[in-house]
Each structure stands twice: as C-alpha cells, then as structure tokens.
Amino acid sequence: MESDAPADANLNSTISVAAVQAVSAQSEPQVSEPVPARLSLDQTFASLKYRNYRLWFIGQLASLVGTWMQVTAQGYLVYQLTSSPAYLGYVGFAGGIPSWLFMLFGGVISDRMSRRTLMVITQSLMMILAFVLAYLTFTNVVQPWHIVILAFLLGVVNAFDAPARQAFILEMVERKDMTNAIALNSTMFNLATAIGPAVAGAAYALVGPGWCFTINGISFLAVIVALVMMQLRPLPVREVRTSAVQDLAEGMRYVLRHQMIGIMMVIAMAYGLFAMGYGTLIPAWAVAILGGDAGTTGLLQSSRGIGSMIAALYIASVGMYNFKGKLLTLGTLAFPALLLVFAAVTTIPLSLAIMVAVGAGQMLLFNLLNMLIQTLVSDDLRGRVMGFYSLTFFGVAPIGALLAGGAATFIGEPLTIVITASISLAFGLVIFWRVPRLRKLA
C-alpha cells in the first residue's frame, strides 16, 4: 500500500472537495421540475421510457424469478435434509461471510471498470453455480455441506455484483428519474418474490428441487443478453492514480463525514442484523408452526413479495414528492411491529395476510434507504458508497440469520421473532426520538 505524504495530501484534498460538494448540494436551492398534482401511471413507470432500462427490467425480472425459485427450493431442501432451523442459519451465514471479505473492494472495482462488463462476468459465474447445484441434486449426491460451500461461493460473486448493480442505475436513466428507477427495481425484485417462491413450491412437489435450480441457471441468460444489448452513453473515464486501498479509504471517510448517509447505514445494519432474521426461519415456520410443507413455504415467500411489490409501486409513484424521509421513518416502526403480529399467528390464511403487510413494511424501510443514499451521494464515489451500503445489508443479515437459526433451536421460532422484532422496534423508536432530521429528508 502506498503511504507517501503527497498521496495522503491529494486524498484529503479530494475528500474535502467531495464533502463540500455534498454539503452544497444539500444547502443550495435546486431548480426542479413541477411536481404533478396527482399520481399517474406515466409517473409510476417513468423509467420504462428508456430502452436500456426496459431491457434491464425484463432481463432482471426473468433472472430474479429463477433466483427466488432456487432460494425457496434450497431452503426447504436444507430443512428436509437436516430438520434443523440452525442449519438454515448456517447456509445464510455462509452466503454472507464473503460480503465482509470482498464487498468493499467490489465497490472500488465498480468505480474503476465498466459496470456492465463486471456484471456480465458475475452473472455468468452465478449461472455456473446454479447448474452445479442442479447437477448434485439430480445425481442424488447433494449433502448439506455442498449447499453451504455453494452458498459461500455465490456470496463471493455477489460481493462484486451488488455494488455494481446498485450504482448502474444512473447509466440507464437520467438523474431526474433515478429515484423512480430505484423504486421500480424493487418492484421488479418483489414481483419475482411473489412469482418465484409459489412456482418453486409447486415445482418442488411435482418434479423436485433439481429443476428449480436448473431453471435458475437458465434464467441468468436473460440478464446477460439484456446487458449485452444495451446502448450505453459513454461515461467520463476516471483517471486512477491511487491504490485500491486508498480508494477504499476515500469512500470510508466520505461515509463517515456525511452524517445522514452514516445514520442510514447504521439503520440498515441494525435491521439487517435483527429484523431480517425472520426470513431464514420461513421454511421451519411453515412446517413446525403452520403444519405445512414446501408449498406453504412458497406461499409465505410469495405473500411477502406481494406486499413488497405493492409498497414499491407506491414509492415509485411518489418518488417526486418530498416526504420520503417520513415514509422511511414509518418503515422503521411498521416493519418490526408487523413482525410481532406475525409471531402471534398460527393459522395459514391469517399468516399469509400478515406476511403481505410485513413485506410492505420491509420495502418502505430498505427501498427508501437505498433511494435516499443514492440521492445524496457524490457520483464519483457512488460505487464505493453503495459497496458500503451493500455490506451493511448483505454482510450483517447473514449474521442475523445465524443468530435467528441458533436461537430458534433453543427457544423456538415464535419467541425468536418476538425478541428480534422487539429489539428492532426499540431501535426505531430511538431513531424517531433522536434523529428528527431523518423525517425531513426529501
């Protein structure tokens, strides 16, 4: 690592300029387009007028349906092989460990090379891993430790894919439609969440998990083809004069100096650690609490996706309005409160209905965190800052999965969700009381 004084001086100068620009962007009056008096479909789907974004939306939707088929089938297969909620946590933890090791450098790389090229590479590697899991399953040799190793390798690839994917939005749409594109990304993700698990539950019962993994592998071709077909405008070439470690330090200092971005990173970390653990327990919950099977697991996941999709469409519709901070605050309180309600229910129909609401609360929280951070961040640091944001979620959530799975083994799934949701709700109340500026973000 280079450590000469001139490099340090240049680094500090660059950070200072970026900090001043960020503060100026927040304090100076901005000229904006008139805000529509009422909501419209054109406003909700504004980003789809861009050809590149349409390609992205269609390709990613197909790929994400396959991904959710694999996630659902893999979780139920692990529980079927082990009968252990703790092992569900091990798989989630293995998938998240690479985030701590590589995610920040993934953000650095996404600022140094073509993000499209990087994603073509990562999506191709994910496709190969899906086919490996399918082969192991079809040949009846799959073991829980195979799934743990493949989850780890998938986590390595995702550590380089996630920051590029988050920062890629501004290359497909104009800045005025960036928040709408972020919200539609979430709509796409949750439409896949609604479709994929339900299809996976049926496919698992009819033809087995191997076909779920095979379909996922094939689905990656959709996003790879979409990326290749895009006609992207040329971006300014960033002259690289510093090492990757220095670039990483620059991004870290930017996050620490930008108070509101730092606070939102802490919120993502806290909820990723505690509130998101419930997702790991869904396969066990479907069997042990609701007396169901793989189909029940799929329905629970799909219900969560439906709720998230409804909330994401709403956020896309109101993206031009200046109350996103209030919606984010609502999400910090509603999401854990709804989890407490879910923990008290033991019938399938009511559980599905509440899971729709849980998905909506989760979407209000994480979609608006992403949207507001992307609105505030400096363009030349976008990849690195989104690397930090991705780390707060992808890196911390698996630890929460491990904690939730381990706790459920000893105290049961309902009490585990009650405790983790209560901690999250208490944290949300502290944020509401101590950080009123959050509610004022536009």
Image (cartoon, rainbow, N blue to C red):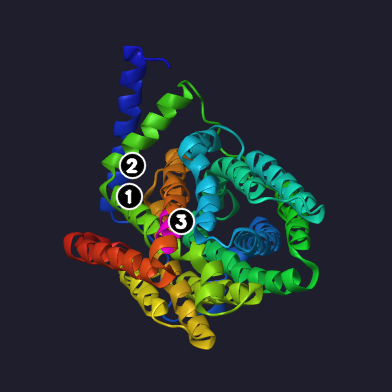
The CA span between labels 2 and 3 is: 26 Å
- At 31% from the left and 71% from the top, the residue drawn is 333
Q: Nearer the viewer, residue 24 or 213?
A: 213
Q: Could you tell me which secondary element the residue under label 1 belongs to?
A: helix
- Which numbered dot is residue 255? 2
Give the labeled residue for mark 3.
Answer: 401
Give the main secondary structure of the magenta stretch. Answer: helix
Q: Which residue is mark 1?
A: 261
Q: Quadrant of residue 414?
A: bottom left
Residue 394 in magenta? no
Mark 2, Cα crowd under 10 Å, few <14 / some 14-19 / many 20+, is many
Label 3 residue SS: helix
Residue at x 50%, y 24% (from the top left corner): 240
Say which of 15 and 264 sits in front. 264
In the rendered view, tell whether residue 296 sits above or below residue 172: below
| SS label for mark 2 | helix
- Report if the CB atoms under discs 2 and 1 are less than 8 Å apart: yes
The amino acid sitting under disc 1 is: Ile
Name the residue type under label 3.
Ala
Residue at the image point whose x is 36% and y is 52% from the top = 269
**Can residue 276 be seen?**
no
Image height of 420 relative to 236, above or below: below
Location of the C terminus (image quadrant): bottom left
| Residue 250 visible in the shown view | yes
Task: Give the side of residue 290 with respect to residue 10, left or right.
Answer: right
Badge 1 local density, few (<14 within 10 Å), some, or many (20+)? many
Q: Residue furthest left?
A: 434
Q: Residue at x 41, y 15 (%)?
A: 2
